[in-house]
Image (cartoon, coloured by chain):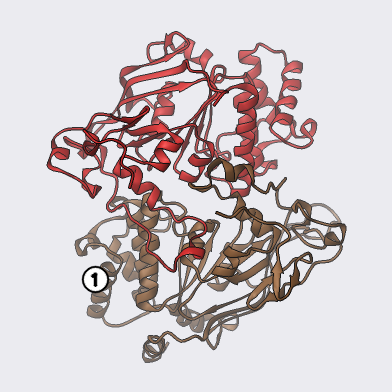
Amino acid sequence: MARESKQPLLTVQDLRVEFRTRRGAAMVLNGVDFQLRGGETLCVVGESGCGKSMTALALLRLIPSPPGRIVGGRVDFQGEDLVRASEARMREVRGDRISMIFQEPMTSLNPVFTVGDQIGETLRLHAKLDARAARERSIEMLRSVGIPAPERRVDEYPHQLSGGMRQRVMIAMALACRPDVLIADEPTTALDVTVQAQIFDLLRALQAERGTAILLITHDMGAVAEMADRVMVMYAGRVIEQGSVEQVLRAPSHPYTQGLIECLPELGSSQIDEAAELAEISGVVPSLWELGQGCAFRERCPYAMPRCASEVPPMFDVGHGHGAACWLRVDTQVSAT
Amino acid sequence: MNEGQAIDTHAAKGVKDAGTLLRVHELKVHFPRARQGWGKPPEVVRAVDGVSLEAARGSALAVVGESGSGKTTAALAVMRLAPITSGQIHLGDTDLGALEGDALRAARRRLQIIFQDPFSSLNPRQRAGDAVRAPLDLMNVGSDAQRRERVAELFQQVGLRPEQQQLFPHQFSGGQRQRINIARALATKPELVVCDEPVSALDVAIRAQILNLLKRLQRELGLTYLFISHDMAVVEHLCDDIAVMYLGQIVERAPRKPFFGNPLHPYSVALMSAVPTVHGGRTRAAQRIKLSGDPPSPIAPPPGCRFAGRCPVAEPACSAELPPLREVMPGHWVRCRRIAVVDGVAQPILRVQAH
């Protein structure tokens, strides 16, 4: 796609996050590698507990500590390593160069400040605008995210807005300083589908206009198909498959990704067959404290081999930048099921 | 509270007959609000505003809609967990709305509910086995040994191991907790099970396990489901009949195949087109029917069609008068004045892109 630049904007290498609790240490992120290019949308998919949100928080150095700690790796962003940046420097980056939209629009806005105060705070802090200019920019931002009567809404409190409007306010706040990277952590999970469609349209339009790179965290494969340029699938703290959206959705190469796609009920099923069973992924995600050696997915995998229990599979290239961390791919080319 | 009678009704329905189990007629649930100021009349939230439904024995009836459409309130009213303002609810020959006290308690054996959130719907201090046994104790079903046997049977039916009866809710994953909830709902051998978004809070991979379980249990036990959901794909997979609610009213009602093959109400079409699909991707997103704004308030619903303000094909006449729910094809009901019937086939005014 023309709007993406080839140069990576953000390069994450071997990122490791450890949680220390009474049960011992667990690797919440265990060697995560990926790149985000300017203007593209990278979707991070996986079940709860796989490390999607931790990846986002680690980029912004917002891992709750204790118990969490970044124990290794690099996050290269515009010539500096964010893992080693000072806290003061991180405060400059957050909300300005990299900003984030959280899942719950109900709890991520402060109920005792007006919408305008909250958008304006970012602008006063980073863009050093005075109160009047910040208010004007806030109104402008509210208009750009499609909120009707922004001059009136700017003085309203979060409880006066619907869920969809609040998420729009969050987006306005996140985009106020024209960040290079927008991290969206399940931004539509709490919203209705028709509102989700509006928010996705808005994100796409704003991205086309401003060239913001989006890291979209989701568990909805349909949303991935609609939004992503590239996809990475995570399982138990590791990236287990990554590639372009066509590669990953049309020719999934890791048994877990295949399972995730097959177990979805799809619209249109009533017109084709009668009462077919859904494919299942058996079992549950293993505890991060009980991973042991080998591939974390082996207990649930229909193709598990002896080798899976002893060695963690590295990422194999299955063609054209499409990678899968599975021993099945050690010497095969793309073989979609 | 006649033990023998409850068992008889259950045995009688072992054979799947085509009779109607649940009949809801013109149900209204209105919640009064405090006065908003001196001299102003008290306001009323019209959460459910004249809903009629029927579910055949052994079938699954879906009520779909967005948050605030009244689908959950309608389900709670069927369970007698929300106050009924007017209208009738019949379960078989029993008028549920008229029951009080012990009679209502006895009738509750025949209808149970599975809640959305598997985390808050279990008591954290109660062992899984005791949670499943609780309805049997409360409703005085069988002897102690029979209850123990029933709990063991239920655990096996929902795919849990017998020794897991001794565990506490926090020792289970979300999917397993939902299995406990299902076992608890089935304990008294109910005829009607209300499922209020039973898979919405679960991970995608676990969703399929629970949906397959619900389907298997329905087949084996001849259950009737009233399935509340906002997920069109899940509903299409599991349910035989669909009712779409918007702002307290039903706007479309039809069996599964005609509904998904030929959705008629502009809201149903928009709702369906809003669902992102793996195969549709960006092409589908580009052809989506865009709805602007939010649903109006259920306190002062607009006169006329309640969807008119957001409808892409609304005419001035739509806002003037509330269109009736009319049967445009056998079994296919729609509340839209713009649906024409040509040679016995209803013509949608809006179309969703087909795959």
Q: Which of the chains is brown?
A: B
Residue at the location (67% across, 49% down)? B289
The residue beneath circle 1 is B152
Locate residue B181: give its quadrant: bottom left
Residue at the location (56% across, 23% down)? A2
Chain A, chosen colour in render = red
Local packing at callout 1 (Cα closer than 10 Å; few below 14, some 14-19, many 20+) is some
**Residue B185 on image: x %, y %:** 40, 69
Locate residue A48: give its quadrant: top left
Disc 1 is attached to a residue of which chain?
B
**Residue A211 on image: x %, y %:** 59, 22
User: Residue B176, can we see it?
Assistant: yes
Residue at the location (70% across, 70% down)? B346
Q: Is residue A140 left or right of residue B76?
A: right
**Residue A117 on image: x %, y %:** 68, 25
> Looking at the picture, which amino acid does disc 1 mark?
Ala
